[in-house]
Image (cartoon, grey):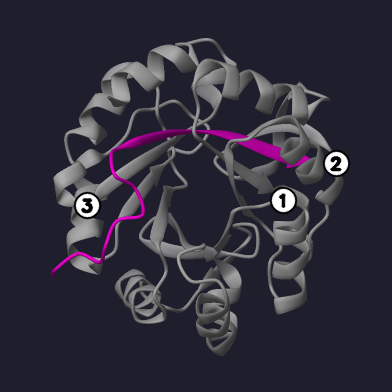
């Protein structure tokens, strides 16, 4: 399938800031009860990412993902004030009002997961309202689509969900392998490339990056439609620096 236009002119390595009760955390395989806290100042983390050379930051409102409404708007505002990086925000965006709140807090893009499958007209409406500023989120566990903060499973097939995102006109799909997320177990670059080819939508790979080689393996799939990768725990645990990661992405 022919790929839709990519939102990126080159492969991008995107550092992640996951927010829980205003703090920077990382979950293990999406389990809210297995959160490691890495800091109390999201703005300082964002500032450090920008200083290291990041062009975009992926921000996840974990509380919002579970409750269904934004819960970390103050942290998003603080991140916006601290950095000029593009900010992509996901979690709890299940209404047009929530999308407006997130954009009003300073997001450049939003990522839609659960609401896209529970309220398809809203997905299409938001893509029309904010052209080029909406990502889709495909969160996959054991071949099934996870929703509502990864605590429920959607009956929708993965391929159907990806096709829905293409029809709606999302700028890219953030594809997360939940079994690898937060584990630093390595990435499946072949699967990310297959997802891009089968969906016809540029893919941002998320989950499992453990080493610089993982980033290089994803980068070489740029022409196959893998336009970026999100890194989290490996950065926070010092497996490599963001500067090194950005270098591997070039």
Of mark 3 and mark 1, the one earlier in the sequence is 1
Q: Are marks 1 and 2 in contact (CB under 8 Å)?
A: no
Q: Is residue 66 visible?
A: no
Q: CA distance from mark 2 to mark 3?
A: 35 Å
Q: Which residue is mark 3?
A: 225
The residue at 68%/23% (across/down) is 47
Q: CA distance from mark 3 to mark 1?
A: 28 Å
Give the image quarter of residue 247: top left
Q: Is residue 228 left or right of residue 46?
A: left
| Closest to the observer, 209 or 132 | 132
Q: Which residue is mark 1?
A: 106
Packing grade of label 3 (10 A; few <14, some 14-19, many >=20) is many
Q: Which residue is mark 2?
A: 21
Q: Are marks 2 and 3 in contact (CB under 8 Å)?
A: no
Give the image quarter of residue 200: bottom left
The span picked out in magenta is 1-20
């Amino acid at each position: 399938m022919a790929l839709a236009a990519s939102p990126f002119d080159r492969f991008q390595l995107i550092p992640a800031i996951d927010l829980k009760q205003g703090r920077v955390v990382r979950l293990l395989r999406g389990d809210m009860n297995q959160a490691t806290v890495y800091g109390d100042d999201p703005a300082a983390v964002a500032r450090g990412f920008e200083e290291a050379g990041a062009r975009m930051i992926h921000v996840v409102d974990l509380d919002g993902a579970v409750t269904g409404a934004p819960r970390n708007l103050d942290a998003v505002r603080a991140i916006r004030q601290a950095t000029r990086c593009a900010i992509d925000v996901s979690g709890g965006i299940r209404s047009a009002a929530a999308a407006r709140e997130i954009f009003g807090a300073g997001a450049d893009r939003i990522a839609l997961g659960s609401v896209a499958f529970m309220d398809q007209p809203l997905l299409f409406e938001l893509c029309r309202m904010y052209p080029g500023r909406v990502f889709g989120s495909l969160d996959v566990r054991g071949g099934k689509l996870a929703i509502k903060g990864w605590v429920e499973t959607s009956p929708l097939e993965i391929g159907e969900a990806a096709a829905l995102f293409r029809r709606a006109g999302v700028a890219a799909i953030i594809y997360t392998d939940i079994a690898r997320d937060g584990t630093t177990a390595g990435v499946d670059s072949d699967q990310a490339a297959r997802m891009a080819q089968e969906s016809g939508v540029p893919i941002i790979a998320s989950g499992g990056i453990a080493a610089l080689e993982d980033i290089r393996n994803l980068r070489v799939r740029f022409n196959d439609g893998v336009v970026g990768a999100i890194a989290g725990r490996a950065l926070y645990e010092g497996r490599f620096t963001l500067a090194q990661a950005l270098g591997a992405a070039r």
